[in-house]
Image (cartoon, rainbow, N blue to C red):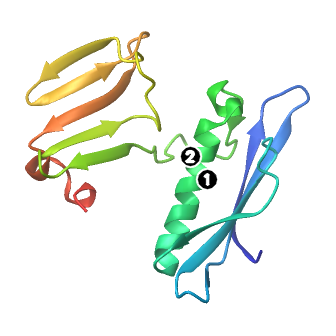
Amino acid sequence: MYEIACRTLTLRTEPPSEVTVSVGVPVEEPTGDWSCPYRIDGLAGWEHERKVTGVDALEAVDLALAMVRAALAGSHEAKEGLLSWEDEPDGRRPKTVYLTWDKDGDIAYIAMKHEIAPGEVVRQETVGGAVLDYGASGELLGVELLGAATRLPSEMRL
């Protein structure tokens, strides 16, 4: 894989170790689709090259980054709070939210994490056309937004 981007995360175990994420250059497949390779070293089960395929090079890179984010966030190490990016610039790292939008019903759901398990929402609060879902320790898990076509920011209305 010809690497175009790489980041090293710290795995706070005893002894500490590293998790290295690499994304390769997208290539056009014989079918006309584009694929983008990626690799995560340091997490069990990810120590080999994988790839995702999109309709063009940009979609392939975007999908590869989405897969890396999902793999890291869904890992046992992340769920246990063992992964960190030591060089994170002043806590300004962008956070990922997950949007699903039912355009026919004009309802969007913005989840604060990749998956919300059944029964994880223990309290709901309705505020001005939005339903806020909270977990057991009071953390915001997601927001159901009514009238999403006019209330979502334009960059989320793709």
Q: How many marks?
A: 2
Quarter of the image for residue 9 reads: top right
Residue 105 spot, x, y in % from top left: 11, 45
Quarter of the image for residue 107 reads: top left
Q: Single out the residue that lies furthest toward the right.
A: 15
Crowd around label 1: few <14 · some 14–19 · many ≥20 (10 Å): some
Q: Residue at x 32, y 30 (%)?
A: 142
Q: Does residue 80 appear left or right of residue 129 in this picture?
A: right
The residue labelled by disc 1 is: 68
The quadrant in which the C terminus is found is bottom left
Q: Single out the residue that lies furthest toward the front.
A: 31
Q: Is residue 28 above or below residue 135?
A: below
Q: Secondary structure at mark 1?
A: helix
Which of the labelled discs sits on residue 34, or is there none?
none
Q: Is residue 98 above or below residue 155?
A: above
- Which of 156/46 is in front? 46
Dot 2 amino acid type:
Ala
Q: Secondary structure at mark 2?
A: helix
Q: Does residue 21 appear left or right of residue 133 in this picture?
A: right
Residue 86 spot, x, y in % from top left: 70, 41
Which of the labelled discs sits on residue 70, or is there none?
2
**Residue 103 in sight here:** yes
Q: Is residue 29 above or below residue 39?
A: below
The quadrant in which the N terminus is found is bottom right
Dot 1 amino acid type:
Val
Q: Residue at x 47, y 72 (%)?
A: 59
**Residue 89 in sight here:** no
Q: Are marks 2 and 1 in contact (CB under 8 Å)?
A: yes
Q: Is residue 117 above or below residue 55?
A: above
